[in-house]
Image: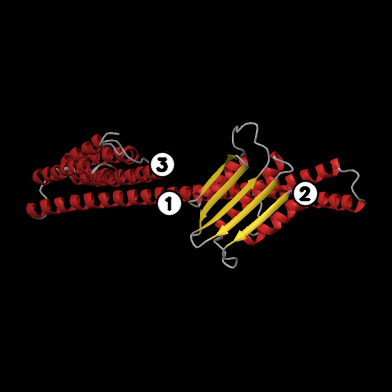
């Protein structure tokens, strides 16, 4: 964009009412001037040619003014200034053009147009002396154009400020929406990870219970009934978890249950024992002290993931769970004596999510084979 191009032109719908008003004013001025000319002609006045010149200049300047409001053209403003040097009939249009240029154009361009209009009116005062001293005329000429220049610059700065404030408000609204969407996405991802851990653990318990019933059809009826009841309860809980996950991902208002704590680990071990997994639990440290909810939930998920992996990859193995709390950290060790895995392969989704959860808490997670079986160990800072 050049310095002479308009910055913000109004639509034609906004210009048409102004054009109509100016045309009406031009017609009225023409009628008034024509009546004055005719009356002076009747009285034999000698100033008739000068008044005809004023009438012609006024009509031309008023005809050009609507174009000035629509296009805000610098050359058109200079033409109006030149007409003002010829006749005072162009003064209203020329001063309006100065205001328009100062309102919409750069300051340097507006200063040049204002200087040209000031000089044109000074020329007008020289060859058509006003009714008061020429010095006062020149002083008023400079003051009026300086006021028009300052007024236009103020309106332009105000419009720019309002435009910047609107843009900032739009950006702030967009940033807020993005932050809310990111928070929603992060919360849904966290919920999905929690539900993955819980649902995977429940399904592994169901699989272990169903496998025990399948391989021991000759078990006492009361044990079969107990196993069937455990399968029914676990299936109902898993189905409810799945329904809750679907509602959450669809944008529902449901929330998860309170996060698990270190005190919930014995219940987790008892559930594993109920399906035939041999589990030993050793919890040492201050049992009354409880770390922050994220740390406690991460320790619980480590035990849960270790028990689930043992049931899937080493059925029948004995699992040893050790949870040690100290003022500095929480250490969780889950080890089984099952056979070595056929191949390491890519880590599962549960282990990847578990590692990310522990590392977000500035902890470490080690998982791999050992001579005695498979070991999963996590160290999580207390704070």
The percent position of residue 254, horizontal first and vertical second, equals 67, 55
User: Foreground mark, 3 or 1?
Assistant: 1
Q: For residue 181, which numbered disc appears in the image?
A: none
Disc with the residue nearer the chain's start (3 vs 1):
3
Report how far apart the C-alphas of labels 2 and 3 lie in the structure: 89 Å
Answer whether labels 3 and 1 touch (C-beta < 8 Å): no
Answer whether labels 2 and 1 touch (C-beta < 8 Å): no
The answer to which image quadrant residue 14 occupies is top left
The percent position of residue 356, horizontal first and vertical second, equals 54, 45
**In the image, residue 358 above or below residue 76:** below
138 or 158: which is nearer to us? 158
Report whether 28 appears left or right of 75. Answer: right
Q: Disc 3 on helix, strand or loop?
A: helix
Q: Residue tagged by mark 1?
A: 169
Q: Is residue 250 visible?
A: no
172 or 376: which is nearer to us? 376
Report how far apart the C-alphas of labels 3 and 1 lie in the structure: 32 Å
Disc with the residue nearer the chain's start (2 vs 1):
1
Q: Residue tagged by mark 2?
A: 276
Q: Residue tagged by mark 3?
A: 16
Q: Disc 1 on helix, strand or loop?
A: helix
Q: Is residue 270 visible?
A: yes
User: Foreground mark, 2 or 1?
Assistant: 2
Instruction: Give the residue drawn at x 84%, y 50%.
Output: 227
Q: Mark 3 packing: few (<14 Cα in 10 Å), some, or many (20+)?
A: few
Q: Mark 2 packing: few (<14 Cα in 10 Å), some, or many (20+)?
A: some
Q: Disc 2 on helix, strand or loop?
A: loop
């Amino acid at each position: 964009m050049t310095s002479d191009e308009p910055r913000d032109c109004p639509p034609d719908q906004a210009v048409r009412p102004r054009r109509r008003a100016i045309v009406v004013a031009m017609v009225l001025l023409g009628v008034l001037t024509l009546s004055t000319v005719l009356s002076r002609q009747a009285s034999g006045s000698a100033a008739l040619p000068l008044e005809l010149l004023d009438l012609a200049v006024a009509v031309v300047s008023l005809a050009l003014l609507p174009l000035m409001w629509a296009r805000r053209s610098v050359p058109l403003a200079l033409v109006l200034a030149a007409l003002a040097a010829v006749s005072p009939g162009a003064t209203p249009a020329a001063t309006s053009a100065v205001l328009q240029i100062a309102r919409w154009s750069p300051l340097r361009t507006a200063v040049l147009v204002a200087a040209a209009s000031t000089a044109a009116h000074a020329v007008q005062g020289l060859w058509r002396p006003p009714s008061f001293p020429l010095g006062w005329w020149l002083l008023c000429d400079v003051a009026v154009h300086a006021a028009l220049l300052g007024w236009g610059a103020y309106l332009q700065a105000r419009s720019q400020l309002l435009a910047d404030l609107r843009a900032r408000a739009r950006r702030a609204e967009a940033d807020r929406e993005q932050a809310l969407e990111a928070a929603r996405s992060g919360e849904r991802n966290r919920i999905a990870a929690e539900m993955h851990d819980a649902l995977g653990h429940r399904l592994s318990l169901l699989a272990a219970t169903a496998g025990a019933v399948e391989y021991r059809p000759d078990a006492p009826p009361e044990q079969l009934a107990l196993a069937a009841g455990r399968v029914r309860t676990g299936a109902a809980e898993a189905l409810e978890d799945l329904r809750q996950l679907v509602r959450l991902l669809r944008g529902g208002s449901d929330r998860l249950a309170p996060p698990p704590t270190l005190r919930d680990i014995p219940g987790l071990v008892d559930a594993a024992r109920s399906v035939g997994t041999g589990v030993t639990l050793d919890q040492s440290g201050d049992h009354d002290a409880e770390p922050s909810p994220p740390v406690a939930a991460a320790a619980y998920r480590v035990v849960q993931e270790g028990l689930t992996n043992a049931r899937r990859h080493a059925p029948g193995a004995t699992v040893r769970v050790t949870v040690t709390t100290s003022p500095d950290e929480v250490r969780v060790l889950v080890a089984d004596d099952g056979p070595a895995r056929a191949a390491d392969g890519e880590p599962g989704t549960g282990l990847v999510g578990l590692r990310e959860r522990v590392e977000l808490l500035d902890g470490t997670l080690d998982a791999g084979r050992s001579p005695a079986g498979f070991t999963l160990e996590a160290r999580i800072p207390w704070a």
